[in-house]
């Protein structure tokens, strides 16, 4: 089944079956339901399109924050499931991408909180991007960057990922992180200085 | 742009490239039924029938979103990957028995799990007696990725993938072990799933190697080696795969496969090294008796240090030549004449009445 098929399926699921077929609704299925159902179908279609276009970018963003691919992928899936549950309230489809980005960043925070507990049992999903195994793929220099990033406070790490991976401006970052534009500016600046210090470079 | 900013962008770009386009699992969203206004809360709570890209709508299953590590825990793993009639399928083990969740394309002969509840490896025939391997991941709600071929080409096996186990995945998911006979000689091959590199150990002469199992250190490979001569004794061995050399028999003998004692008595057909690092679980076939050579079967715990039995044995209902542990080491899969079962807390229960299972893992 293709992405298109999924979209069709989801939208079909949301549509009033008789209305789609052009027949008269039965008693107990009031006409008043129809606009609500159409709105939901349109929202779902927009969400599917958003996922299709931005899944990879969002998963890569999560990868930079949580460190491993499987978790990053789950984070994006979970974020979209949450958005889908709130589809009735997502009336402005142009705003879905910022919502999705914020949802992904929030899910990453949740994962990292849980991971502190998981580390006690000594298990991780798979070697993170800062692990020795990853050095073979990324190279030692890049691994050093991720090791340094990992040592930064979580909010600083998020700010750097949003700024230097997604290339978002300060206003967009502020919206996603739920902080002021000025705070973004200072957070990025301090994060860069701390990172340079950890890497033994001039800020 | 400062040097730090340059390095940051470069590292992000390289890490992003490690997650290539087209390699991600498809979108899974809850499909909701048409509802009356008063059913909204119920629909949100109960309406989790998934729609899957690249597969089939999940028939009749109610997948649950699982957060964090899906391995282990009270009731055991939520999902298994099974090979049924040559097809791989994800099945839900969350309720009573098994229910089909999602089929996968392609034909496969064996499946191995890392124990994290989400990473699996499949073996499929690649022509002749050569086999190729694929990595499969499940999302938190059991949606499978498309199986990704592992690099490094194929492994030849004269014996193919039967039971007891020929395929095992290391708990960290970085290495696969394939044991069997190649060119008439017993052989163990370890495949690095990232680089595709192979390392091979062989034993002189004829004989068999079965029951591949990894220790939680991700470097010790356990197996059963059976010499060809009728007088030869089968033994459970532990091979340190980080040490140099290619001699399979340089591995340490854990114990003879024949086991006698007050607790259990018989022959070990297959065993798994448990995640605790201290114990192993072995399936033991008791002495044959009666006119039809009936035998009793049991699952017993052994010490991983010296192979001695510890604890009680769990009786099994039939001819079991199979045992696979989950990531916690508290739940064990069984496959008896093609029918799956499980052992939890000292008790066996059937998972399905279907008897077309070739292999399964969780």
Image: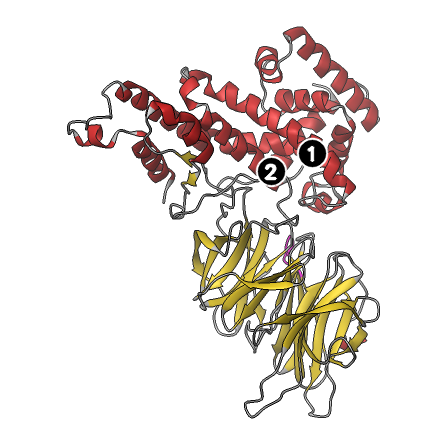
Magenta stretch in the rendered image: B193-197
Which residue does the image show at 58% across and 85% down from the upper left? B294
- Residue carrying label 2: B67
Per the rendering, the mark at residue A134 is: none
Which residue does the image show at 35% across and 23% down from the upper left? B37
Q: How is the image coloured?
A: secondary structure
Marks 2 & 1, CB-CB < 8 Å contact:
yes
Per the rendering, the mark at residue A114 is: 1
Residue B110 in view (yes/no): no
Q: Quadrant of residue B120?
A: bottom right
- Which chain's residue wears label 2? B
Which residue does the image show at 66% across and 33% down from the upper left? A66
Q: Position of residue B289 (x, y in %)?
A: 62, 89
On screen, residue B308 versus residue B159, left or right, reads right
Q: Quadrant of residue B3?
A: top right
Disc 2 and disc 1 on one polypeptide chain:
no
Q: Position of residue B240 (x, y in %)?
A: 79, 65
Q: Position of residue B341 (x, y in %)?
A: 55, 64
């Amino acid at each position: 089944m293709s992405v298109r098929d999924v979209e069709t399926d989801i939208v079909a699921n949301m549509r009033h079956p008789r209305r789609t077929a052009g027949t008269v609704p039965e008693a107990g299925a009031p006409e008043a339901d129809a606009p609500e159902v159409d709105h939901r179908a349109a929202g779902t279609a927009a969400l599917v399109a958003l996922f299709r276009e931005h899944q990879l970018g969002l998963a890569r963003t999560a990868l930079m924050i949580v460190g491993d691919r499987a978790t990053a992928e789950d984070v994006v899936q979970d974020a979209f499931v949450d958005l889908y549950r709130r589809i009735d309230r997502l009336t402005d489809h142009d705003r879905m991408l910022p919502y999705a980005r914020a949802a992904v960043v929030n899910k990453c925070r949740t994962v990292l909180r849980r991971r502190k507990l998981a580390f006690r049992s000594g298990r991780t999903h798979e070697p993170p991007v800062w692990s020795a195994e990853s050095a073979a793929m990324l190279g030692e220099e890049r691994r050093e960057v991720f090791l340094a990033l990992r040592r930064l406070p979580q909010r600083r790490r998020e700010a750097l990922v949003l700024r230097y991976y997604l290339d978002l401006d300060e206003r967009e970052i502020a919206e996603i992180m739920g902080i002021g534009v000025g705070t973004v500016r200072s957070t990025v600046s301090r994060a860069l200085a701390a990172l340079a210090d950890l890497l033994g470079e001039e800020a | 742009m400062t040097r730090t900013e340059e390095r940051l962008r470069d590292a992000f770009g390289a890490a992003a490239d490690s997650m290539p386009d087209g390699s991600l699992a498809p979108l899974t969203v809850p499909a909701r039924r048409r509802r009356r206004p008063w059913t909204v809360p119920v629909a949100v709570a109960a309406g989790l029938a998934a729609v899957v890209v690249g597969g089939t709508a999940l028939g009749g299953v109610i997948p649950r979103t699982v957060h964090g590590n899906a391995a282990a825990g009270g009731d055991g793993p939520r999902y298994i990957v099974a090979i049924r009639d040559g097809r791989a399928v994800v099945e839900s083990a969350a309720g009573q028995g098994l229910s089909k969740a999602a089929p996968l394309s392609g034909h496969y002969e064996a499946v191995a799990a890392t124990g994290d509840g989400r990473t699996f490896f499949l073996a499929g025939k690649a022509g002749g007696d050569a086999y190729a391997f694929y990595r499969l991941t499940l999302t938190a709600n059991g949606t499978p990725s498309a199986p990704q071929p592992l690099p490094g080409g194929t492994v030849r096996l004269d014996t193919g993938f039967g039971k007891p186990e020929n395929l095992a995945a290391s708990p960290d998911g970085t290495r696969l072990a394939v044991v069997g006979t190649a060119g008439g000689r017993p052989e163990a091959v370890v495949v690095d799933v990232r680089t595709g590199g192979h390392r091979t150990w062989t034993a002189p002469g004829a004989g068999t190697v079965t029951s591949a199992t990894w220790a939680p250190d991700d470097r010790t490979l356990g197996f059963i080696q059976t010499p060809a001569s009728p007088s030869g004794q089968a033994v459970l061995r532990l091979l340190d795969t980080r040490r140099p050399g290619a001699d399979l028999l340089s591995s340490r003998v854990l114990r003879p496969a024949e086991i006698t004692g007050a607790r259990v008595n018989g022959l070990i057909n297959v065993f798994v090294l448990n995640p605790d690092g201290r114990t192993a679980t072995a399936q033991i076939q008791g002495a044959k008796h009666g006119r039809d050579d009936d035998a009793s079967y049991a699952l017993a715990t052994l010490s991983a240090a010296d192979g001695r039995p510890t604890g009680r044995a769990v009786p099994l209902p039939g001819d079991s030549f199979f045992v696979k542990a989950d990531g916690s080491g508290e739940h064990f899969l069984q496959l008896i004449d093609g029918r799956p079962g499980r052992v939890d807390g000292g008790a066996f229960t059937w998972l399905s009445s279907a008897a077309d299972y070739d292999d399964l893992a969780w």
